[in-house]
Amino acid sequence: MASCSRRQLIAASLAWGTTGCHLVRFTNIESDKTPSVGDALKAAKPDGHPLDGPRRVGMKIATIAAPLRDKAIDQAIWHTTDEQIFSEELRNSLKNNGLRIGLLRSSLPAEIEELMQHGGFAGQKVEPLVVNQPVSEPTKIATTEKTAETSLLIDTGSKVQGKTYREVTGYLRITASIDDQKGVVLKTTPELHHGEMKAKFATAGNVENAFEPAQMSLKTMQEEEIFKDLAANVRVEPGQCLVIGLDPSRESGLGWFLLTKPPVTDKETQQKLILVWAWNSGREAVLDIPTIVQSNSRQTKTFQPLESPPPAIVAKRDQNREKTNDDQLKTAGFDKLKPTPKADPKPSSDSKPGPS
């Protein structure tokens, strides 16, 4: 038997002895490549560079105020607003707490357009608030001023309970996510901030990328009660509008506190309506910053030699240089060491002219 065959026999015997009754097949198996951090980031952001900032969503938010049960915000807007996009259970929960939410797919009714001309603060024109937020970072709309104390009836579905809040402010939390190239999903959640200010550790914004660590910071804040059972997700396309309003039949409810303004002096109670437009603004900030660098800004400039200055400037420069040298000699004392001038030789009277 050849030496090579002996080596194969020995190797097979050793393999048999070390593995028991299991046969061993010698094959060249390549191990799977471990994905790098860059590959993981690309997978998390397939539509952009892994080092790009978070995707952004633009929102235009308008708050309109009118007398309680005004026909424009209590009836006209809801004739063209679709509330059936939510489940019956969610619609009932919102109604029991005095809230109405829907999607307006057409333009604003004429009554609302007219109301926006004088339905703002102190009867002025409504100026929508434009925000540009990273995806999943909430935008909080303060719908009320801080109230010293209020008692509300909260319908949780299984029971209705009364609760008293002190130093309370009402908010609507709107969190946006991008559904596709055009659509934006808005998650609307009511919440109350109440109680004394206390120092707490809180997450500094929501993190879009799972590979980015959550940033914790120490904040001085009130207690936050978020009504997650009343959260509504709405897909909004460009030109469409999210409508958030009040059901005035539920006094002392959460919606009544969030979307009404108590009467001041002789004025009656004001009812509020919130309109939200949203769009995918990419990764650009609020300012209109171009994302593509123009090619002419990267062109190499041709070297051009400097031209020689005019003769008058050259003469002035030489004159100043000589004056500077003279001043330096005087400062050093070299101006006192003047060379003795040589006398010109004069012909003597005794000298006789030579022979011609």
Image (cartoon, rainbow, N blue to C red):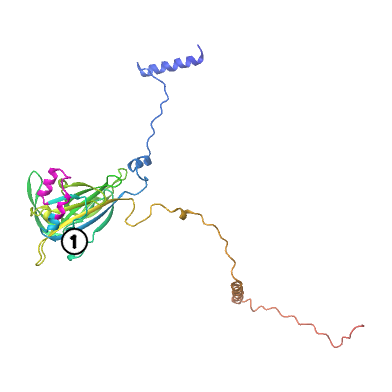
Q: What's drawn in magenta, residue-wise?
A: 76-98
Q: Residue furthest front?
A: 110
Q: Position of residue 198 (x, y in %)?
A: 19, 55
Mark 1 crowdedness (10 Å alpha carbons): few <14, some 14-19, many ≥20: few
What secondary structure is marked by label 1? Answer: helix
The answer to whether any part of residue 145 appears in the image is no
Instruction: Give amino acid for label 1.
Output: Glu
- How many labels sit on residues? 1
Residue at 51% in and 15% down: 3
Q: Position of residue 168 (x, y in %)?
A: 14, 56
Side (left or right) of 103 relative to 288 = left
Q: Position of residue 352 (x, y in %)?
A: 89, 86
Q: Nearer the viewer, residue 127 or 226?
A: 127
Q: Which residue is mark 1?
A: 114
Q: Residue furthest top?
A: 1
Side (left or right) of 239 relative to 65 = right
Whether the magenta-drawn stretch holds residue 84 is answered as: yes
Residue at 48% in and 14% down: 6
